[in-house]
Amino acid sequence: MGWNKIIIDVDYQPCDPGITNTFSERTEVNRSDLKPGLSIAYKDPSGLFPSILVKEIDDQGITLQAGKREYRFEDVNGRRTAKMGKTGRDYTYFWLWAALVSDENFDL
């Protein structure tokens, strides 16, 4: 079975004393909606992360570009995950993650 979607998460945590919760905005994109040369629209509450461009797609995985860096995700044991960025604004930390998923029942 091949991979079937990309999940992009922007996790964030306020730096206020006493707040220990981390929050997340998730975007799921089916493989059939991904095309080389197109950008992936994703939820980014920071407004600071770069657009994500689809560079290549094949049966083994996908190559994405965020800013000047490229990331290769391959279908290995059902998923492949990478931290694509981190930043901060207004006393809040933000992290950008992406994952390739091959099992519709797999939950990150």
Image (cartoon, rainbow, N blue to C red):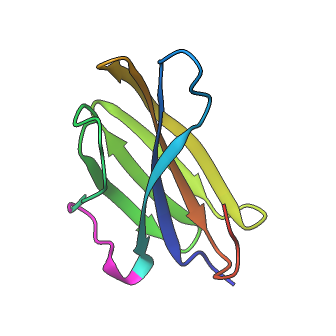
Residue drawn at x 59%, y 67% is: 60
Q: Is residue 46 left or right of residue 101?
A: left
Magenta stretch bounds? 32-38
Could you say where residue 61 lies in the image, as x and y percent from the top left?
A: 54, 64
User: Where, by quadrant of the figure, is residue 104 drawn?
Assistant: bottom right
User: Where, by quadrant of the figure, is residue 45 drawn?
Assistant: top left
Q: Is residue 35 left or right of residue 95?
A: left
Residue drawn at x 59%, y 20% is: 18
Could you say where residue 7 lies in the image, as x and y percent from the top left?
A: 49, 61
Q: Nearer the viewer, residue 93 or 50?
A: 93
Label total for image: 0
Residue drawn at x 48%, y 18% is: 15
Is residue 97 placed above or below 89 in the rendered structure?
below
Question: In the rendered image, which quarter contains the C terminus?
Answer: bottom right
Q: Is residue 34 magenta?
A: yes
Q: Nearer the viewer, residue 23 or 17?
A: 17
User: Where, by quadrant of the figure, is residue 100 drawn?
Assistant: bottom right
Q: Is residue 51 magenta?
A: no
Could you say where residue 58 lies in the image, as x and y percent from the top left?
A: 48, 70
Question: In the rendered image, which quarter contains the N terminus?
Answer: bottom right
